[in-house]
Image: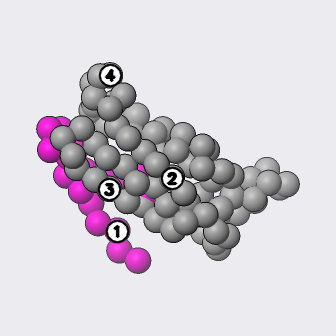
Amino acid sequence: MKLKKISLKKNQDQLSDSDMKQIRGGAHTSSLCGANGGSSFEYLYTCYTTFPGGTKSTGNVCATDSNNAKAKAMQSLLGSGFEHEEFNKINIKCD
């Protein structure tokens, strides 16, 4: 599967393929996701990200629950060039 890269309006950054892993699927088991520490399994979640200025992105992340998926998506965006105020305006919903 080829992942698209998006350009962010203000920062002109591009998300790498690893950043895009956070973004497709609906929570279900997948060979892409494994056991997390042996006892709890990770599921494939679809995350929908809206950036300041309206740019939208969708992708996959393996996580134990939707809150964990959202946290992983936010973590992947740290250091992406957003100022603190802009970073706080990024909206991520995972299901």
Is residue 49 in sight in this rendering?
yes
Q: Nearer the observer, disc 3 or disc 2? A: 2
Name the kind of residue labelled 2 in the image: Cys
Label for residue 94?
2
Magenta segment boundaries in residue numbering: 1-23
The structure residue drawn at horizontal position 46% and vertical position 49%, both measured from the top left corner, is: 93
Of label 3 and label 4, which has the lower sequence position?
A: 3
Tag 3: Cα neighbours inside 10 Å, few (<14), some, or many (≥20)?
Answer: some
Residue 34: where, in percent of width, then height? 70, 63
**Type of secondary structure dominating the magenta stretch:** loop
Residue with the mark numbered 3: 57
Report whether 27 appears left or right of 55. Answer: right
Circle nearer the viewer, 2 or 1: 2
Q: Which residue is mark 1?
A: 3
Q: Residue flagged by tag 4: what amino acid is it?
A: His
Q: Which residue is mark 4?
A: 84
Q: Quadrant of the N terminus?
A: bottom left
Mark before the other along the chain sequence, 3 or 1? 1
Looking at the rendered structure, the secondary structure element under dot 4 is helix
Mark toward the viewer: 3 or 1: 3
User: Dot 4: few (<14), some (14–19), or many (≥20) neighbours within 10 Å?
Assistant: few
Q: Using residue 38 as the reference point, say whether residue 67 is left or right of it.
A: left
Image vertical order of residue 73 relative to residue 27, above or below: above
